Image: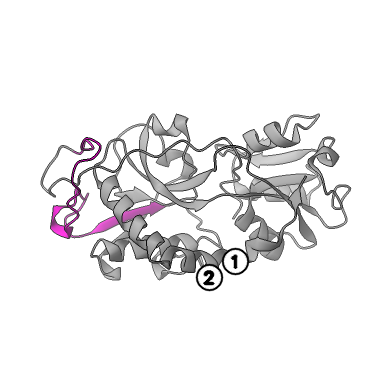
Amino acid sequence: MLRRLLVLPAAAAVLAASACAPADNTDTKAAPSGAAVNCAKDRLPLKTAGKLTVATDTPAFEPWFKNDDPSNGEGFESAVAYAVAEELGFTKDEVVWEKVGFEQSYAPGAKTFDFDVNQISITPERQKAVTFSDGYYTVAQGVVGLADGKFAGATAKEQLKDAKIGVQVGTTSLDAVQGQIKPATQPSVFNNQIDAVNALKNGQVDLIAVDLPTAFYVTAAQIEGSKIVGQLAPAGAKEEFGMLLEKDNSLVGCLNQALGELKSGGRLQQITDQWLSSAAGAPVLK
């Protein structure tokens, strides 16, 4: 889906891994950096004892989820969530999903979930209100237009300066467009993915900026006769999706440990290759 249309605002360093508190410990403040991490299943600070509560938005789009069903284990983020759960000792039937809107997820305050997976980029501003795990996906941005459109043949960012470009509210795509393309007209900002897609279909905008895997979904399933014009190469620090937790939740240390195992063992790369491998071919806009 084109929901998290993100691009380069430099992703901030994620919060340091911290010790996981006992399940009955109401203090969820992260332990000091360097503290030992006890990730025994019965020691995890969970919202519901014995259950791992995972949140995401609705509808849940491909390639992040399949058939709008996060619980089926298919799609990149569903597969990552279940792989992390397995590392923490949970069976599939011990994972509970709930629906939380994208912007609601990183709003300040208490959370009803243990962590959220929703193509949420780690940014310094969001880190003021919530805690992020280490990154589980490094983001590239795609620019999508109609195959017969005025800008379909562009090979350089300079050629897109006169384009009307659409982005989704609450995402980092706006920064990417403004920082790299520097269009003559301010980008149009839409409330959700469908509005941005429809704007491109209806000729309200010439292009939309989205994360690259979403760009492939848009062109394959949402807009007939559309194409990926190209991708924006990362500039500076890489941008990553992170699992989002309530501010200072000590569970983050155990999520980072689980992600570390998935990375070092090659499983995270296998999941990435399975669900996002088609993202490899879009040309980089120079």
Any magenta on residue 37?
Answer: yes
Any magenta on residue 133?
Answer: no
- Local packing at callout 1 (Cα closer than 10 Å; few below 14, some 14-19, many 20+) is few
Residue at left 73%, top 51%? 284
Q: Quadrant of residue 63?
A: bottom right
Task: Give amino acid for label 2.
Answer: Gln
Q: Is residue 247 left or right of residue 269?
A: left
Residue at left 29%, top 66%? 86
Q: Quadrant for the N terminus, please.
A: bottom right
Q: Which residue is label 2 attached to? A: 274
* Mark 1 in CB contact with mark 2 (< 8 angstroms): yes
Observer able to see residue 97: no
Tell me which segment is drawn in magenta.
28-56
Q: Quadrant for the C terminus, please.
A: top right
Q: Which residue is label 1 attached to? A: 277
Q: Nearer the viewer, residue 157 or 168?
A: 157
Q: Quadrant of residue 223?
A: bottom right
Residue 119: x %, y % from top left:
50, 50
Q: Classify mark 2: helix, strand or loop.
A: helix
Observer able to see residue 244: yes
Residue 19: x %, y % from top left:
20, 44
Q: Nearer the viewer, residue 71 or 143?
A: 143
Residue 41: x %, y % from top left:
17, 59
Q: Nearer the viewer, residue 204 or 132?
A: 132
